[in-house]
Amino acid sequence: MVGSREHLRRGAPRRGRLRSVALIGVDGSGKTTQAHRLAAALTQRGVPAMYAQNAGGRRWFGRLAARLGRGDAQRLLGRTGLLLVESTLRWLAIARAVLRSILGGRVAVMDRYAVCQYASIRSHGAPQWEPVARIAYSVFPPPDVTFLLTVDPQEAQRRIEARGTDSETLQFLTAASCAYRSLPESRTFVVVDANGTPDEVSRAIDEELRGWLPDGPEPVAAGQLRP
């Protein structure tokens, strides 16, 4: 597992107050699994945290499209329609997560964030919509740490097929992977190789976050920090 400590040092100062962490990457990279694990591990360590799913509805619309015989979400809604719906739903989800975090005084562990929408727009080949999305999402503060979970597109597709709830083309997964790395924000991402097991990925994330956490005993297991 490789975490980019150089990128983390260039980001927000370490050992400050951790307010939010975002996990981003292509579908099948393990974002949801790791976000749940991280929220639980931080809380166990004495840093109250909450999990926040900031999905744009693509998977749900994809399943609806399949039931209606329309292939996928883009064929159901059209490219512009899909991006509009996705951008709106994700904006509302992030707004809710940020508000919950502030009111509850908890660290927000974000399963996807604003940059995921920019990557989606690039993946769909609609660059004209990115400036609009950036204006809309500019109201949200950047996370203190953003983990980019990288995975081979073939492995991501295998995982998606294994869960059996939706599907994704290798072409789109490849385009999405390239899109994340092309974003101007990519220089601030902490890159974690997510091709390994969930425990290996959790250990890499835990290691990168140690500088933000109160001094204390070392983690006892992947994704689990001592209280």
Image (tube, rainbow, N blue to C red):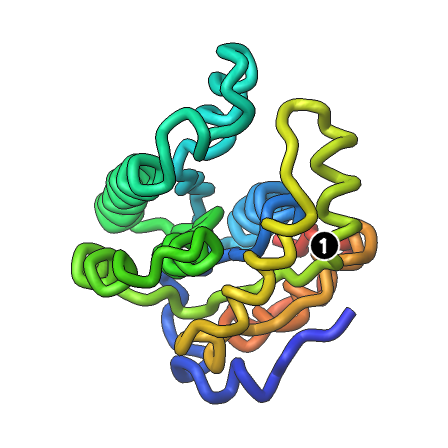
Q: Is residue 121 visible?
A: yes
- At a point 65% along the width and 32% down the height, the residue shown is 167
Q: Nearer the viewer, residue 186 or 106?
A: 186
Residue found 57% across the figure and 69% down from its top:
209
Task: Answer with left or right where residue 26 lies relative to residue 98.
Answer: right
Q: Quadrant of residue 174?
A: bottom right
Asked if 168 appears above or below 42 in the picture, the reply is: above
| Quadrant of the rendering where the N terminus is positioned | bottom right
Q: Which residue is the site of mark 1?
A: 153
Q: Secondary structure at mark 1?
A: helix
Query: Can residue 44 be seen?
Result: no
Nearest the viewer among 136 and 122 is 122
Q: In the rendered structure, which amino acid carries the disc numbered 1?
A: Pro
User: Along the line of sight, which residue is nearer the eye, 13 or 126?
Assistant: 126
Q: Is residue 69 left or right of residue 87?
A: right
Answer few, some or many: residues within 10 Å of disc 1's Cα (few below 14, many 20 plus, some between 14 and 19).
many
Q: Where 218 falls versus 184 (above or below)?
A: above
